[in-house]
Amino acid sequence: MRLSEAAPELNLIRRYANLGGLVGGISRSERGMAFNQLVADVLQRDGIDAEADARGPRGEVDVAFPYEGTWYLLEAKWEAGPVNADPVRKLHSVVNERRPGSMGILASWSGFNDSALRFAASVRNIILFDRAHIEALLTGVTAAQEILSAANRAISVLGDEHVPLAALLRPRRPSEAPIILGVPDGFTPAAVAAPDGLDAEVLAYGEGIRGLSSYENRLLITVEDGVVELGPHRSRIRRRLELTGCEGNVFGDSDGSLFVARRAGVVRYGQDGIDAVAGGYERTPMIVPGINGAPWLLDRSTTGWPGNQPGHLVAPGGNLGDDQRYSCELPAMSCANACWMRDHTFLILGEGNSCVVDIRTGKFVWIVTPVGRPHGLIRLNETQVLVTGWNRYLQTAVIDTESGWTSQPVGVNLAAHVGDAAMLNDSVVVLAGAPVKRLARSSVGIRGVAMGWSRVRRW
């Protein structure tokens, strides 16, 4: 398999992975010092003036930094097992020797045992961060300012010094009805009807829709503050995830967990809460179906002049930093979507031209993209996909990745921007913008009528 070089923005994650494996023969004590510097560099990336290994007459501090008028003294621990109360007690003593109002943060890669939690609860000037918090910062899933403000609120308002990552990133005031079933008032399908176009049934609408996918006969709809689910009978919307800052389509895995993009990375939500699985990207990645249906990423980040740099397919590893990266061959700015076809072959959907690439050999072929401004991509079988886009109105067509054949696009009477597409039973569901009175920047979910889907299938 041909691996591509990662962008410089991923260096922090690469350093983190090297620390985990003690790469280069470094000792555990050397790893501790390198971990301190890594934490300081992550904070500096987010615009916080952090310094590592600050020494003074009253001892050494692993990382020190000011934020919103408060000095934070951070102790970083990378141990084999959960730390006990001793490091918490020591940090509490150090904080008490500094200026009144200073706060301590104990960041433990291996978490905390009960004695550490009890002691921290008794002193009220120590914030506890575990591996999930550290990796969320490292990947850019959260910014330092965001997690510090949330943790400070938790200890000051709620009296909780060790708040799970999921709770820190949960919306304080979630939308009561982010998605509304039915047709919005004043809905206009299209200012200009598509020639011989199809009509579409509106399922639901909302102002903050960010993405769309399907999972086990259900629609998963990404909104600004999480993920909602529309069941097979399309009669009830229910919450699946409360999480601020969600972007793009959510991916439902076979074990019931959800993968969703946030800021510069991707998180996984499961029974144990939220953890970061990938990140360090300049542009929010897109989650795409990879080999055998596993969640992969489409990284469209670039450095310098974007016109000559390819996008990358990313296969997340078992641990953060174990990713495998493969060139899409298509310029990053042209990549609209991607999906696995069979073996090691992927289709990369692009503006103007798409690319079928074998990531094992690096061989690729070009295919003319049959729709304008493409985005939606549905794998029909090992060789065919359905794509959606728009050019004055919604368009849909079929691409055969083996022969290079493409169908003539079928027009649908719906105007404005077209986003994600998903298959639900025998219908195609598309996320599309439409002019709606009193609902600025609204999006609607439309379902292709059976006749329309049959017309596409005949090709």
Image: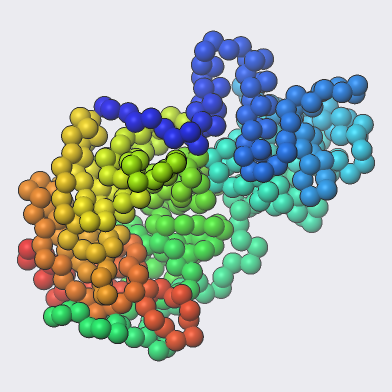
Give the x, y percent position of residue 57. 91, 21
Residue at the extreme front: 305
Residue 405 is drawn in which quadrant? bottom left
Q: Residue at point 48% right, 79% down?
A: 440
Give the x, y percent position of residue 94. 87, 29
Quarter of the picture holding the N terminus:
top left
Q: Residue at point 68% right, 32% down?
A: 40
Q: Is residue 157 visible?
A: yes
Does residue 369 appear to the left or right of 145 in the view shown?
Answer: left
Q: Is residue 113 visible?
A: no
Residue closer to the observer: 83 or 136: 136
Q: Residue at point 55% right, 44% down?
A: 140
Does residue 348 appear to the left or right of 56 in the view shown?
Answer: left
Is 393 above or below relative to 165?
Answer: below
Q: Residue at point 21% right, 46% down?
A: 355
Residue closer to the observer: 271 or 188: 188
Residue 127 is drawn in which quadrant? top right
Number of marks: 0
Residue at the extreme bottom: 186
Give the x, y percent position of residue 93. 88, 30
Quarter of the picture holding the C terminus:
bottom left
Give the x, y percent position of residue 338. 28, 49
Residue 437 is drawn in which quadrant? bottom left
Does residue 30 appear to the left or right of 361 in the view shown?
Answer: right
Is 26 above or below relative to 184?
Answer: above
